[in-house]
Image (spheres, helix red, strand yellow):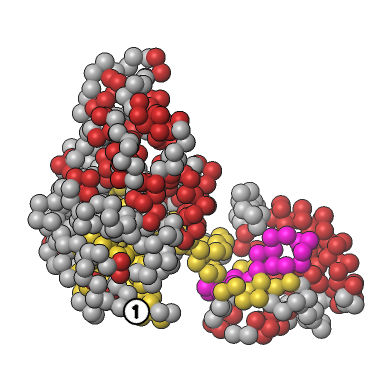
C-alpha cells in the first residue's frame, strides 16, 4: 500500500514496481546516511522454483537532491544480471547453499553500482553478488550469514546490499481497501447500512509474511551534501531530498527468432516513489500512470491533490460524527498547507521547535531528510508527531508507522502547525489501522541493511 | 555518431533487410501479432492502405517518384529535415538490432532505436517506400 501496486500499469510489472523508500541517518554510524528502495511487492516466500529476482532489463535508480531544486544531484544506478550455472535442471539450487560461491546455487544475480554526479558516471562496483532468496532449512540453512556476506563495500566508505528482505512496511490492507475500514474503529464505520461490525477489532498486518527486494546503500553524509559540511539543523544545506525510479528501454519487440524480447532505445521512467502513499492514496486513478513517468519537479500540477486530499473528505463520510471539525475544514475548501509542507516542500524553520527539513518552494514529492538531526536512542515510530525529529517525515526509518502518521495528518492533527485556530477532532489523534512495528514478525536489524531477514518459503505461511 | 551517417546507412539497406526488421512483431509460428501492440501488423497495414497515396505524393513532390518504385539498392532518398538525436546512439548500435517505430504513417516521421539511442527521422519518401514494400507482402 505504501506504493505496492499503486498504479494500473506498474501493477502489471512487479520487478519495476517500487514499494517503499527509506532515508535516515544510520543509527550505528551517524556519519552516514542509509538509502533504501524496495521493489517487487507482496512476495509469497514459497514462490519457487523461479524465486523472485530483480529485472535484468530494468534500470533502478536512487536519486538525491541537495540544492532544493527537486532535480537529482547524486544518482546511484543499479543494473542486474542473471546467470544459470546449469540450464539443464529446473532447480533453483541443486543442494544446500552455504556460501555466495556455492556450486549448488543455480540461478543467481549479480549487479553493478554506478554513481552519476556532475554529469559524470563512475562505476563504483560490478559483479556484486545478491544473496539467494530464503528458501528453507535445507537450501539456505544459515540465511542471515548468506545475506550478511552480500553486504558489499565500495570505494569511499560506501556499503551496498541488493536482495530479498522481509517486508518492513506494515498495513492492514484487507481492511483499508474494504471501503476505508479501520478495524479499531470499525464499529463507528457507516457500513453502508449493513451493520457488519458491532465492535472494534485489532488490526491485521497484511504484509506480515511477505517479502520484498531491497536496494540499500549507505553513503557518508559528506558525499550527499552540496558543499558540505552542513552540520547545523537550521542549515538548509543539511537537507536532502530522496526518491527512487525504475526505467525500461523505450522499444521492446518480441524477437521470434531469438525467442526473447529485443529491448532498445533510451530508458524511460515507469515507476517513481518517495513519500509513502502519495501516488497510492492522493493521486487519482486516471493520473497515476502519468505521475509515475514524471520527475518530482513536475509535481506542482498535482498540488491540489495533496492540499485537498480525497481521503480527508471520505473520513467524515465513512465515520459519521467522528470527524466534525475535519468535515467543516473540508466543506470550507481549505487548502491543507500542513500537508503541502509535509509532503511537497518540507517543514520550514519556526513551525516545529528545533526542526526543519525545508527544501524551498519547489513543490515536489521527495523524502526530505535533515542529515544534521542525530538518530534518537529510543526512537518513536510515530516520528515527528510522536516527538521524535529523527523519524518520518524527517526522512523515513524502516520501522516508522507511516500509515498512522499520514492517517492522523490527513485527519487534521497537523493542521494547527499552520492554523492555530483549528482544533483537531479528538479522533484525529487516535486514528490508526491498529498496527505497530511489533506487527512485523521478522522484526528489523540493528545494522545495515536494517530490514529483517526474509521469511523462508519452508516456514511460510505458518 | 553523426545521425546523417546513420540515415545514409539505413537507406542503403536492401528491401529484404527492411522487411526482416518488420518481422519481429509477427509471430510466424502462430500467424498472429499481439493485438495490443501499437506496432501491430493490422494497424500498420491499415495505415499503409489509408495513407500510402499520401506518402507517394510526398515522394513525387520531392522529385523521386521513380526512385520510390525502384529497389532500395538504387539511389537513395534524403531525409526531409536533418535527423534529430533524441538520445545518443553509440556506433556499436549500428550493428543492430535496430527497432523502427512508425507511429503515424501520414507524417513521414519515424524513430529508430538502437542500443540506448534514439534518432527521429522525417523522410516521407522512405516511409512511402517502406509501405510499398509492406504491400508486396499482401
* Residue in view at x 62 percent, y 76 percent: B85
Quarter of the view holding residue B15:
bottom right
Residue B108 within the magenta-colored segment of the rendering: yes
Q: Is residue A186 left or right of residue B36?
A: left
Front residue of this view, candidates A217 and B45: A217
Q: Which residue is mark 1?
A: A123
Q: Main secondary structure of the magenta part?
A: strand
Chain containing mark 1: A
Q: Quadrant of the N terminus of chain B?
A: bottom right
Looking at the picture, how far across and down is residue A453, in whole percent?
17, 53
Q: Quadrant of the C terminus of chain B?
A: bottom right
Looking at the picture, how far across and down is residue A337, in whole percent?
39, 46
Q: Is residue A207 left or right of residue A361?
A: left
Front residue of this view, candidates A154 and A222: A222
Q: Which residues are magenta?
A: B101-118
Front residue of this view, candidates A162 and A377: A377
- Helix or strand or loop: what does disc 1 sit on? strand
Looking at the picture, how far across and down is residue A81, in whole percent?
36, 68
* Residue in view at x 30 percent, y 33 percent: A423
Amino acid at each position: 500500500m505504501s506504493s505496492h501496486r499503486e498504479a494500473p500499469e506498474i501493477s502489471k510489472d512487479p520487478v519495476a514496481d517500487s514499494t517503499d523508500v527509506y532515508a535516515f541517518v544510520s543509527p550505528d554510524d551517524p556519519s552516514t546516511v542509509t538509502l533504501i528502495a524496495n521493489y517487487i511487492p507482496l512476495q509469497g516466500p514459497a514462490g519457487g522454483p523461479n524465486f523472485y529476482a530483480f529485472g535484468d532489463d530494468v534500470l533502478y535508480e536512487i536519486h538525491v537532491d541537495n540544492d532544493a531544486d527537486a532535480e537529482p544531484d547524486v544518482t546511484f544506478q543499479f543494473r542486474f544480471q542473471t546467470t544459470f550455472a546449469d540450464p539443464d535442471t529446473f532447480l533453483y539450487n541443486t543442494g544446500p547453499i552455504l556460501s555466495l560461491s556455492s556450486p549448488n546455487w543455480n540461478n543467481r544475480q549479480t549487479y553493478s553500482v554506478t554513481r552519476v554526479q556532475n554529469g559524470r558516471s563512475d562505476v563504483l562496483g560490478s559483479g556484486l553478488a545478491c544473496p539467494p532468496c530464503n528458501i528453507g532449512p535445507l537450501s539456505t540453512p544459515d540465511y542471515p550469514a548468506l545475506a550478511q556476506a552480500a553486504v558489499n563495500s565500495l570505494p569511499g566508505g560506501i556499503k551496498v546490499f541488493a536482495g530479498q528482505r522481509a517486508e518492513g512496511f506494515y498495513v492492514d490492507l484487507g481492511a483499508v481497501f474494504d471501503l476505508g475500514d479501520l478495524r479499531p474503529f470499525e464499529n463507528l464505520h457507516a457500513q453502508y447500512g449493513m451493520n457488519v461490525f458491532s465492535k472494534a477489532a485489532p488490526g491485521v498486518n497484511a504484509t506480515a509474511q511477505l517479502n520484498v527486494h531491497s536496494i540499500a546503500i549507505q553513503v557518508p553524509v559528506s558525499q550527499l551534501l552540496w558543499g558540505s559540511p552542513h552540520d547545523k539543523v537550521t542549515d538548509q544545506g543539511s537537507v536532502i531530498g530522496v526518491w527512487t525510479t525504475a526505467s525500461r528501454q523505450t522499444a521492446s519487440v518480441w524477437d521470434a527468432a531469438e525467442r526473447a524480447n529485443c529491448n532498445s532505445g533510451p530508458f524511460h521512467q515507469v515507476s517513481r516513489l518517495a513519500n509513502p502513499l502519495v501516488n497510492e492514496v492522493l493521486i487519482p486513478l486516471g493520473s497515476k500512470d502519468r505521475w509515475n513517468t514524471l520527475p518530482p519537479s513536475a509535481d506542482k500540477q498535482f498540488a491540489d491533490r495533496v492540499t485537498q486530499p480525497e481521503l480527508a473528505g471520505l473520513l467524515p463520510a465513512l465515520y459519521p460524527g467522528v470527524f466534525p471539525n475535519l468535515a467543516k475544514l473540508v466543506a470550507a475548501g481549505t487548502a491543507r498547507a500542513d500537508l503541502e509542507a509535509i509532503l511537497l516542500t518540507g517543514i520550514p524553520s519556526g513551525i516545529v521547535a528545533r526542526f526543519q527539513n525545508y527544501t524551498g518552494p519547489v513543490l515536489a514529492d521527495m523524502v526530505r531528510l535533515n542529515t544534521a538531526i542525530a538518530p534518537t536512542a529510543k526512537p518513536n515510530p510515530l516520528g515527528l508527531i510522536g516527538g521524535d525529529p529523527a523519524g518520518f517525515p524527517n526522512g523515513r526509518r524502516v520501522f516508522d508507522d507511516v500509515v498512522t502518521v499520514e492517517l492522523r495528518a490527513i485527519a487534521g492533527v497537523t493542521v494547527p502547525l499552520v492554523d492555530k485556530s483549528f482544533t483537531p477532532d479528538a479522533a484525529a489523534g487516535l486514528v490508526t489501522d491498529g498496527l505497530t512495528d511489533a506487527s512485523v514478525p521478522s522484526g528489523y536489524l540493528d545494522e545495515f541493511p536494517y530490514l529483517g531477514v526474509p521469511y523462508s518459503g519452508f516456514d511460510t505461511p505458518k | 555518431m553523426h545521425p546523417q551517417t546513420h540515415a545514409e546507412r539505413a537507406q542503403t539497406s536492401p528491401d529484404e533487410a527492411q522487411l526482416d526488421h518488420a518481422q519481429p512483431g509477427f509471430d510466424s509460428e502462430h500467424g498472429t501479432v499481439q493485438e495490443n501492440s501499437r506496432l501491430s501488423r493490422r494497424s500498420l497495414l491499415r495505415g499503409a492502405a489509408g495513407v500510402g497515396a499520401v506518402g507517394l505524393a510526398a515522394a513525387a513532390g520531392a522529385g523521386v517518384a521513380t526512385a520510390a518504385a525502384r529497389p532500395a539498392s538504387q539511389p537513395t532518398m534524403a531525409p526531409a529535415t536533418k535527423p534529430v538525436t533524441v538520445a545518443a546512439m553509440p556506433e556499436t548500435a549500428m550493428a543492430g538490432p535496430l527497432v523502427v517505430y512508425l507511429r503515424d504513417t501520414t507524417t513521414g516521421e519515424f524513430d529508430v532505436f538502437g542500443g540506448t539511442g534514439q534518432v527521429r527521422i522525417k523522410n516521407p519518401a522512405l516511409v512511402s517506400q517502406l509501405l510499398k514494400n509492406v504491400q508486396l507482402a499482401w
